[in-house]
Image (cartoon, rainbow, N blue to C red):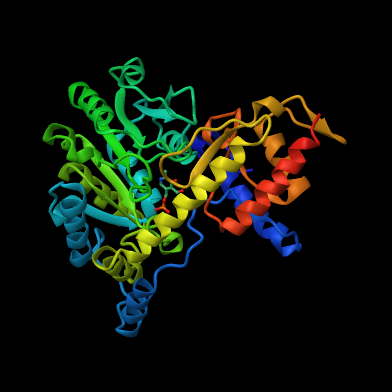
């Protein structure tokens, strides 16, 4: 066989994507699966946002746009930063891309050279290390030890800084642990970046989903920190727009210009229709966002209460995003019929086969003793899922 790119062979299989495909075939086969693995809101995209897209199509706004995105959208993003995050940017400091995922990849391509090190606190979203490997840099993991609480400290990060450190990827609020970082911690980490001359890639896609503790945008902490911060955000999570693929970055002009150059040769502009929808999302009423956040919070409280009552399970209360990490290590070594549970993957498979409830094994997030449950599902389904799970756990001996 003609060979492939060497870096592709370094990448781990994308279990989340595999699960998504498997889920589709299980559903097609008629299995009544309750999916608690998905990282997307179960709500519909708000009506006024859809309407803006329909108008864009009707008005023929279906052609190429500037690579960095239409001015109107970049202006709306600046207004959002000013009014909601207390950070000043101009449209020239902004680029919009096909989801926060493309923003992250572009940012890493723009700043990293072969052999550079990128700090990633773990547990982490599974895409970070693989993106870093793909561009030829090296992921350096900073273990936060207790995923449920995500006890990240500046001291732990400091121990991993070397002269090859190019960036740290910080995700706040955090997938998968639900941690929300306070201002002081952000200041300490930002100052490390300023002093050590490396970037902070601040992934803020769960910004609106902070139920306990206040969300602060990294770039708002100080001007020195802002100069080192590439803020990554998007509309997928907050506005239930995962399929529209809207992501954006704000940061030092030199970095944004490099990202624009990369994007100009790879994908060009983000979808024109989604850009119009994004303007409506950012400038319109946030009533539907507030409704979703309240609903997620109700589910969060429900699921924590149910899980904490289950024998053998332990979990801490997440403060943000829509996930909860559940420690299932007490079940390793147990079995039911011919199913033996040795790790979090076996645990997820056992629950899926026994109960038709799908949750993500912690290996995806570098948290091997855990499974991640997404509570982005109706309270009714969550209740059924918890009942079934509780029953299945009692069978294990
Ligand atoms: N960052 C984190 C932490 C995520 O969990 C996700 C999606 O799951 C993304 C970025 C990507 O979001 P988008 O849909 O905008 O590409």
Residue located at (75% from left, 31% from top) = 341
Placement of 197 over or under 110, stated as above or below? above
Placement of 74 over or under 177, stated as above or below? below
| Image position, residue 249 (x, y; %) | 27, 49
| Image position, residue 377 (x, y; %) | 56, 56
Residue located at (75% from left, 59% from top) = 31
Q: Is residue 20 left or right of residue 145?
A: right
Quick one: quadrant of the C terminus? top right
Residue located at (36% from left, 18% from top) = 156
Quick one: quadrant of the N terminus? top right
| Image position, residue 237 (x, y; %) | 41, 54
> In front: 47, or 241?
47
Q: Is residue 270 left or right of residue 32?
A: left
> Is residue 14 at least partly visible in the picture?
no
> Is residue 205 at least partly visible in the picture?
yes
Please count the marks in the image. Answer: 0
Q: Is residue 355 left or right of residue 20?
A: right
Placement of 356 over or under 14, stated as above or below? below
| Image position, residue 92 (x, y; %) | 14, 54
Residue at the extreme bottom: 58
């Amino acid at each position: 066989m003609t060979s492939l790119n060497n870096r592709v062979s370094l990448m781990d299989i994308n279990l989340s994507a595999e699960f998504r495909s498997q889920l589709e075939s299980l559903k097609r086969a008629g299995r009544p699966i309750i999916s608690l693995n998905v990282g997307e809101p179960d709500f519909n995209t708000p009506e006024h946002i859809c309407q803006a897209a329909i108008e864009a199509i009707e008005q023929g706004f279906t052609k190429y746009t500037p690579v960095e995105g239409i001015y109107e959208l970049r202006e709306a993003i600046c207004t959002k930063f000013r009014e909601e995050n207390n950070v000043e940017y101009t449209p020239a400091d902004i680029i919009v891309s096909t989801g926060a995922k493309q923003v992250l990849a572009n940012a890493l391509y723009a700043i990293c050279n072969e052999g550079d090190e990128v700090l990633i606190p773990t547990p982490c979203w599974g895409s970070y290390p693989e993106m870093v490997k793909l561009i030829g840099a090296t992921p350096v993991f900073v273990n936060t030890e207790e995923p449920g609480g995500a006890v990240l400290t500046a001291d732990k990060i400091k121990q991993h800084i070397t002269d090859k450190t190019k960036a740290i990827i910080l995700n706040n609020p955090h997938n998968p642990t639900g941690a929300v970082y306070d201002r002081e911690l952000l200041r300490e980490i930002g100052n490390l970046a300023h002093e050590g001359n490396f970037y902070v890639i601040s992934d803020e896609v769960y910004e609106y989903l902070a139920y306990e503790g206040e969300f602060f945008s990294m770039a708002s902490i100080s001007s020195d920190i802002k100069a080192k911060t590439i803020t990554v955000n998007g509309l997928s999570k907050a506005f239930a727009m995962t399929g529209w693929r809207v992501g954006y970055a704000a940061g030092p002009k030199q970095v944004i210009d490099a990202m624009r150059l990369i994007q100009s040769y790879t994908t060009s502009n983000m979808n024109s229709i989604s850009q119009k929808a994004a303007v409506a999302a950012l400038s319109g009423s946030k009533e539907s966002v507030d409704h979703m956040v309240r609903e997620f919070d109700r589910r969060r409280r429900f699921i924590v209460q149910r899980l904490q009552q289950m024998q053998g399970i332990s979990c801490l209360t997440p403060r943000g995003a829509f996930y909860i990490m559940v420690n299932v290590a007490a079940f390793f070594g147990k079995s039911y019929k011919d199913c033996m549970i040795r790790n979090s993957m076996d645990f997820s498979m056992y629950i899926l086969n026994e109960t038709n409830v799908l949750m993500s094994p912690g290996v995806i997030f570098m948290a091997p003793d855990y499974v991640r449950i997404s509570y982005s599902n109706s309270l009714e389904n969550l209740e059924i899922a918890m009942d079934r799970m509780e029953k299945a756990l009692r069978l294990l001996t």
